[in-house]
Amino acid sequence: MVTITGNLVNAYYVCKRQLWLYAHNIISEQENQFLYLGRIYDKHFYKRDKKEIVAEGMKIDLIKWRDKKLIVGEIKKSSKFKLAAKMQLVFYLYQLRRQGIEIDGELLIPKEKKREKVKVDDNLINDIENAIKEIKMIIFRDKPPPARKTRYCRGCAYRYFCWA
């Protein structure tokens, strides 16, 4: 049985090939400038809030109190992959809900001073359940999906597995 993680959900919405490579423990370029920037953002912003909560399939960036409510936060360095980031957060909220924890989320993009509230509804649950099914199908393929050139390829830490 494979454990679906937030990172796999994020990759699903960005690139199916990246998803397969990541799921098969093929390590991306670790010196990639965008990965490095992400690590800096993770450490620099929201220092006062409880950070990095780890549970099965989840590595939640932060949990904080706002308006007397507990909020799960997902921090991203830009809104470039906003749908992927939002669905990663929806996955966390969905997993928590399945465990009996009703909680809202916020997508946080500190560099752009953006904050988007995320509440799980029936449509988002349907979307994430369908994504999970497709993720499993992709992971169990013998080979990765074919490379498809997109505007995101240039900064991708896996680009050498596609365009070398």
Image: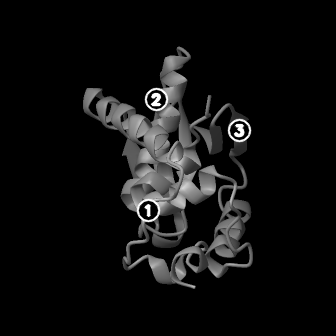
In the image, what residue type sits under mark 3?
Ile
Left or right? Give the position of 32 relative to 96. right
Q: Is mark 2 on a helix, strand or loop?
A: helix
Q: Is mark 3 on a helix, strand or loop?
A: strand
Residue to which mark 3 is pinned:
53
> N-terminal of the two: label 2 or label 3?
3
Q: Quick check: 118 above or below 21?
A: above
In the image, what residue type sits under mark 1?
Cys
Q: Is residue 95 or residue 150 the one in the foreground?
A: 150
Q: Quadrant of residue 6?
A: top right
Position in image of residue 152 (x %, y %): 43, 76
Q: Residues within 10 Å of mark 2 (few under 14, many from 20)?
A: many
Left or right? Give the position of 34 relative to 31. left
Instruction: Residue 67: tell me if it is visible.
Output: no
Q: Quadrant of residue 164?
A: bottom right
Q: Residue at coordinates 62% horizontally, 28% vertically from top-left?
A: 1
Instruction: Residue 143: tell me if it is visible.
Output: yes
Residue to which mark 1 is pinned:
15
